[in-house]
Structures are given as C-alpha cells and as structure tokens.
Amino acid sequence: MSEPPTFAKATVGKRLSADAEQLLRELAPQVLGAVLRRYGDFAAAEDAVQEAMIAAAMQWPRDGMPDNPRGWLIQVAARKIIDHVRSETARRRREDVAGRDAEQLAPAPDLDAAAVHDDTLALLFMCCHPALTPPSAIALTLRAVGGLTTAEIAHAFLVPEATMAQRISRAKQSIKASGVPFEKPGERDRAERLGAVLHVLYLIFNEGYTSSSGPSLQRSDLATEAIRLTRAVRALMPEDGEVAGLLALMLLTDARRPGRTGPTGELIPLAEQDRSLWDRALIDEGIALISQVLSRGAVGSYQLQAAIAAVHAEAATAAATDWPQILALYSLLRRMESNPMVELNYAIAAAMTHGPETGLKLLEPLSADPRMAGHYRLDAVRAHLQQLAGNDEAAIRHYQAAAARTASMPERNYLTTQAARLIAKRK
C-alpha cells in the first residue's frame, strides 16, 4: 500500500513552492472524492490520484500551475485509471473488451463542473462505509481524507504499524467484495455514520495539534483541515450537539497553538505558556458554542471535553485553573467511555486537585492496559507527578523512559531536558 507522496521530493530540478505543496495537500482528498464517485474502485482511484499528484509535483515547477489545478488533477487521475484498464485488458489479450471498458471509463465532460459540493466532505462520509467496522472505516478515512501515514494512524489507534497496514488493506478489500457503491450518503446514512466521522476528525485534529513523529510539534495543516471539515459537517447537521461540541473542542484547543512552542520550536507546557498569545477570537467562539449546546440538556463526550477545554481557556493563569471542576467533568466523561487517555487525564486532574500521590495511585491500573503499557504519555505523566511529589529519582527515570519512547523530536527534547534539570539539581 503506497503512502501519500512527499511532493517536494518528487520534483525534478525546480521545487514546488510551499503554497503549491499546500494546495496539493488540500486538493488530494477532493480529487480522490471526485474520481472515486465517477469510477467506484477505491484502490484504483487512490493509486491514480497519487500518480496525478506526483505528475503535478514534477510538471508544475517546470510548466507553471494550470488555471484549474483541481480539474487538471482529476483529468490526469482519470487517464491513469483508463491506461491501467487498457494495460490489464491488453495483457489478457482482450482488446475488444479493452475498447468497451475504455469507452465506459472515459471521464465525463462535466466531471469537475458537477462536483460543486465539497468532495472532501463527501469522501469523508463515503469512507465510513456500511461494509466496514467502525475502526476500519476510521483508519481508511484517515488515509484518504486526512493524508496520514500508516505509522501515524497506528499511533492514533495505539497499535503496531503492521497491524494498521493490514487493517487498511482489509478495509479496501471488504468494500470491493461488498459490491455496495461509494456514494454521497443521504440524511439517514449521515446520521448512522456520524459517530465514525466525528472520531476521524478528532484523530486528524489531534495529529495536527501534537504530531506523533518528526521535527515539529504541530502540523497546522492537519489541524486547520480538521476544523474546516468539522464546520462543514456542522453546516449539514446544525442541530447535532456532538458536532458542535467537537468543533468547540477544536477551537478552544487550537487557540493555544501560538503559545505552545518557543522561538526554536521547543515545546512549552500548558502551565508555562504565555496566555496572552492564545487566540482570543477562537476562545470566544468556542466558549459561545459549547455554552449554547450544553444548555440543551443532552451531553456527549465531545461536549464534555470542550467544557474541560473551556475551563482551561477561562483561567487567566495556570494557578487560577479550576481543577475541581475539571475533575468533575472528567468523572462524567469516564462514565461515558472506556478510554485509557481519559483515565490518564482524570489522574492528572485528581493530582492537581488532591495531590500527586492520588494521581500516581490512579495511574497504576493503566500499566496493565495493553493500549497504554509502554506508551510514552504514561511515563511522561508519571514523571511529572513524581517531580511534584518530590521524588526526583523516580521522575528522572520516567522522563528518560518517556523520551526514549516518543517519536516526536520536540517532545523528546523537552522530556530529556526535564530529566537533565533534575540530574543537575542533585549535584
């Protein structure tokens, strides 16, 4: 299974500009949605679109960007599919079938003009296919819409990369075997698939807000795209409280982005951030949105998480944070879903409310959870709470263990620095 192409590396001679690279990332799911809607074969459409993206990365720096980049990519991808069919049928010595197939697969003249709606949003719902289990649908959508690599998706699901690669491959095979066509779902289907769609957007945003690997702490392109898509879903379903809750959560969380890194891209923890750098417009929008939906009465998990983010956003300083309220909100969230990350955050809130020893005790069961055992976040939280408790030896050990397990360079540098400071303090 191929991964999303690295456009800058695919160029020959001249390189794509940063704006052109960003445009290709934004257009990739739109083009895939248009081609998939026309031809119906997910695997073939994905391969054709990736070939079109590589062709653009090679030709645009040399020949200039076309007037209609999206239409150009769709037509190139369509030709790739036709060429593939012709090649396969010729190989089987069925030239007569090849001619008919090529005629059937010829791109419709209005392929680009007909796609007046957002093909990315259509693809988002299309990938949450009834032939798939929710985990498989989410994984496939993260690849097709989010542009995440298999490794990034595996990290989000807390499973090995090989396991995720097999899951995505099986998802494509299941869709093909089902015979159910990819198509934009109606109102009823949208409601049935909404849970998976929201989880996809949540994971895409999380990967953008804190990248699981690489030299940068954040991938603002992913976070921004997740917010854009969530706004689009809310426009389709304005009365759904969980859609609004997820959008509020994203806005309130993304508002902190300017204060999360220093001049050289180093991580700045929440307690040490300059809150004057936070985006007040996003905070105001997020608080207004979550206040509106909470007043309706029915509360879901995304609404609770948004309410927690709102408490953080409303605190003028870290010391002014209302931790008892956050702890109460996490208590409600724990009753709604069994999630090790919720348990981890509940332990942090308990530690900030009742003391680090309480938090450390709550962390103990997570070591037996296969989804968290060996995860760097568990060691990182343990290190922080041990430091608050004055147990520097244990804190150093856990900081170092966490640093060894994360693939994010900024997080690794932060954790290593914390351990080094405690080591220096002992000398």
Image: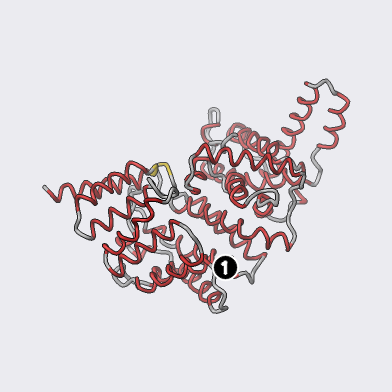
Residue 291 appears anywhere in the view? yes
Any part of residue 145 in sight: no
Q: Residue furthest left?
A: 427
Q: Is residue 205 left or right of residue 236?
A: left
Kindly identify the amino acid type of the residue bearing the numbered disc 1. Ala
Relative to the observer, which residue lies in front, 284 or 386? 386
Q: Could you classify mark 1 by the number of other residues whose Cα lies within 10 Å: few (under 14), some (14-19), or many (20 or more)?
A: many
Is 197 left or right of 188, judged from the image as shown?
Answer: left
Residue in the picture at 63% in, 46% down:
29
Residue placed at 36% from the left, 52% from the top?
A: 378
In the rendered view, tell whether residue 312 sits above or below residue 406. below
131 or 320: which is nearer to us?
Answer: 131
| Left or right, residue 211 beside residue 405 | right
Q: Which residue is mark 1?
A: 244
Q: Nearer the viewer, residue 227 or 381?
A: 381
Q: Quadrant of the N terminus?
A: top right
Picture layout, residue 188 above or below residue 406:
below
In terms of secondary structure, where does tag 1 sit?
helix
Q: Residue at x 59, y 31 (%)?
A: 58
Coordinates of residue 306 in the picture (x, y in percent):
48, 67
Name which residue lies at 59% across and 43% down: 24
Residue 139 percent across, percent down from the top left: 58, 47
